[in-house]
Image: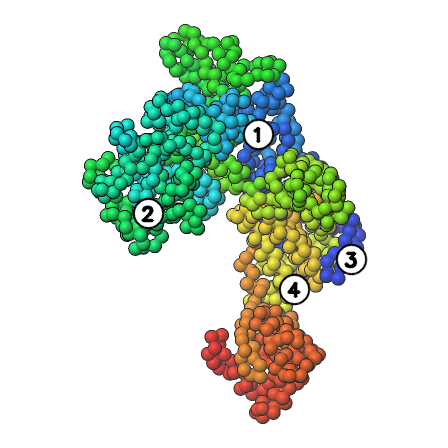
Amino acid sequence: MVMLARRVSAVGGSCARPRRPLPQHHPPRRLLGGGIAKEVKFNLRELDKKWHARSQQPRWHRLREPTEKTAYVLPMFPYPSGTLHLGHLRVYTISDVLARFKQMQGYHVLHPIGWDAFGLPAENAAIEHGMHPKEWTMQNISAMKKQLRAMGGRFEWNCELHTSDPNFYKHTQHIFLMLYKRGLAYQAEAMVNYDPVDKTVLANEQVDANGCSWRSGAKVEKVMLKQWFLKIKDFQDALLDDLDVLAENGRWPERVLAMQRNWLGKSEGTLLPFEIHTKESGTQLGSTEVFTTRLDTLFGVQYIALSLKHPIVQKLAQDDGPLRAFLDRPQDLPQDSKEGYLLPGIMAKNPAGVIAPGVALDVPVYVAPYVLDDYGSGAVMGVPGNDTRDHAFWRANTENSSIKQVIIGEENTATKTLFPDTSDDRPIVAKGFVGSDVPEIGGLTSDEAMNAIFERLHASSVTVEKKTNWRLKDWLISRQRYWGTPIPIIHCASCGTVPVPRSDLPVRLPDLPGKDFQKMTGNPLAEDPNWKICKCPKCGSGAERETDTMDTFMDSSWYFFRFPDVENMATPIQPTRASANLPVDIYVGGVEHAILHLLYARFISKFLATTPYWPDGTAHHGEPFKHLITQGMVHGKTYSDPETGRFLHPREIDFTNKADPRISRSGEEPKITFEKMSKSKHNGVDPNTTIAKYGADVTRAHMLFQAPVSDVLEWDESKITGVQRWLQRVIRLSKVTFIPPTVMKSFCPLPSLDLPTIELLGALRQKKVLKRPPIPDGSPIILNREEALIASLKPNEQIFWSRVQEITSSVTKSYAESYSLNTIVSDLMTMTNLIWDQQHTSEAMSYLRFTATLNLLRMLAPIAPAVAEEGCEQLLAVATEHIGHLPDHPLARRMYRSVFQLGIPVADLDIIPALNPTTVCVFQVDGKKKFDCKIRTPPIQILKNHKKTQQWVLDQIAATEQGNEWLEMGKGKLWKIKATDEQPHAEYPQLPESWTPVLVKNGKLVNVVSRKMGKGKKDSSSQFDPATSEIFEPRLLQTMEPDGRKGGSIE
């Protein structure tokens, strides 16, 4: 890192004119607004290539002085599918920007990249093309790496990993064995989701609402298989409770926390029995336990629904052919199906009967696919009057049956009866009051009723108990495929299940010929005797390897532990490396991973925090990601036929008039929407094409500017030219042609980049750039050093420098806290225009604009690194002509290498009030107060000119809301006091010509006096001097405090 000059030298240093000839500086051509004239456009694509080549030099951590501060910024690693899409580009741009910002803050940044290389798509591609999955995977990794480099990303390529590397998955196997040793990995028979096309098991989350596989789209079958599970339920309390830790200060988005809570699904309720019996004979078929969180609705139960595998259902199916046929159907039904099978002649007895004897509470029993076998005991009570799902099920399975609604929204109201096809036929799902006509508990609130029902059932010897249920199930990790991490277990006829010794890891996948994968189905590992047959590590007899491989979520559940210690072959990570780098400071990825990946990563991290590998893990609650950023999806512009709805290819659109595109064949206006990108909608965008056309910096900045990080981004290429023009302007601004040749002859940048404003002004004063403030002769004004230095700046210079500090603060806060990257781009555009539009008012303004431009480039660098580097090089090409004799100057050629070494500028917020001094001004009309307002205090430079001071104050008043009400030309209240139309005053155009301003105490009070008052017709004791607009003996100008109280006369 370049050591900045000490503060004393920054103020006291001088820059002598260099001896070598100065370059020729031509006066800048200016626009009417004071900006710099347009110049030749720069080829931003060529800048990308130029600076990308330079950035490949291994100096990422050498640009800033080594520091103990570390930052771990990580994007979710990609699956190597072949090409990066705009969604990838967005996530990696976000992480790259934040990593660069952290590096510029002085952190030692870890920003790695890797590849989630195992999985079904690679194996399916191998089957389709007759090639090995590894070959397909590595080809795709190579192609995607080129894209990542083209987008301007700077990653720790020396930390690159891919999960299909045996040097990685040996540690995945080791973690599995640690779980197995702890009793957290087990094998059990289970009903699983089986994909008949991919011939593998799917987790519940991989089955969509229609019962289809998320990969192949095939209807999923339910089969019993012996599977491997991890006991994630042992960590369910910590997984739920620690969400509160992640919610602190907005560390994780609330919607992700809500999704995790819902998936964990903790519910407090009651377990109670319903007796199942035949309607005619009363034969008891057994009791089934029902779990409910709404015991207050017990008197509203109208049916019981049993799961397909419930023991009573299985028993009845032996003699019920239609029931057996129904049980064979659900695999073709969606999981939220409303279909049900009414068990003929079977009833359930509601235990509420013991509370209200004599009330008929027998209800019918259905078999329903929506009832889960493993939720409670596979039975739910149906309350159609107070539950949306139950209401829909009842209406779908009964014709015109009424519904009893026992929980009412209003107190002291009887239960209601709902009839189909009426406006009132909808459930009340919120808690409320029990209907007043319900026996024993009528009129109670829902909470009171739950307690009362529980106590009465318990007193009546009904077996009820409070219970907590969880939606979360143990994690099924078995997959019957080749391309995954082999499970390190050996099955021995004598010894049973035996873990592979750690010294024998990794258990490698067999290297099968690529042609063997063509037309292959099922699991190749189970069909390869050379790999499957082995010896038992315990007894040495013949045994077989476990042929299941692990779910790829197992790889992604811990990969972030590996990056800080990727060269360590012995263990997953050294404890010291884990404690020094984890948890990840900023984790960036799509919200589609909000449940599974993040939940499994939290589970494995909490487990590793109980091992020697992460000794400091417990201090972080075992949470792997400190801050989570979930970016929204990228949608593309989509054209469709308004009549048929058919999606149209852009080739079918006539863009002759870009503002009014038409369907080529019909001339009709197409329907234009933004949809999720897909081939079928012809709305995909290739990042390579966009980068090749506009350059990486323009593409990155446009992507960040279009929408907040967490929102859906509607990709509209027609708007990218605005960003392109802005970056062109930044480059032109960096030529500093705004510095006139007369100033450039002695111009020398200060040797300290982030001086507080007062010290910066002091340095300019010492260089005789800043003149002393022009205090009027005879003025009693006495200024301290700070006031004098600020007063040396002209008003526009004070306002300019104040805005620079405000924007710098906003940008830094957005980078560091809110991650509002779209706001950063907007702020930087504002700052560019602010610098561009300033007029040259003094030599000091040249220094302020130069410093502001340098700070603009420093803040732009994380987003548009090539433009920032080029701009800085141009800016400093001017500066270095004058600092060659100062070898330690941070901008000297010997010291400067990159804009990234200069760091992020520091805003001087404390100076803003001093740069924007205000006064409370009382506004009077003919001596009567109308309002008071806060205005900017008149600058010292104009105080000696009374008319200028009056004009200044009137301008300031007119800019306020109340002032505009009175002074708006032709419309303000002052203009309407007289009936006749008046022309504006010749010297004070805010006033009608017959009015004159009277200024007191430099703007603390303004009295506008009508001509008759000025002549003294109303008060002969007042004397008006038209030459100075002053009133002597000013007893008319009685002041008032802002709250309306009268004050003393202003002398």
Image spot of residue 38 (x, y percent): 77, 53
Q: Earlier in the sequence, mark 4 or mark 1?
A: 1
* Residue ID for mark 3: 29
How crowded is the residue under tag 3: few (<14 C-alpha within 10 Å), some, or many (20+)?
few
Q: Which disc number belongs to residue 406?
A: 2
Q: Residue at x 43, y 25 (%)?
A: 325
Amino acid at the residue labelled 3: Arg
Q: Earlier in the sequence, mark 3 or mark 2?
A: 3
Q: Quadrant of residue 977?
A: bottom right
Q: Quadrant of residue 28?
A: bottom right
Label 4 vs label 1, nearer the camera: 1
Image spot of residue 543 (x, y percent): 43, 10
Label 4 vs label 2, nearer the camera: 2
Query: Is residue 633 shown to the viewer in this render?
Result: yes
The secondary element bearing badge 3 is classed as loop
Q: Which disc number belongs to residue 79?
A: 1
- Residue closer to the observer: 1035 or 905: 1035
Amino acid at the residue labelled 1: Tyr
Image spot of residue 416 (x, y percent): 34, 50
User: In the rendered view, does 462 fall on the left or right side of 809?
Assistant: left
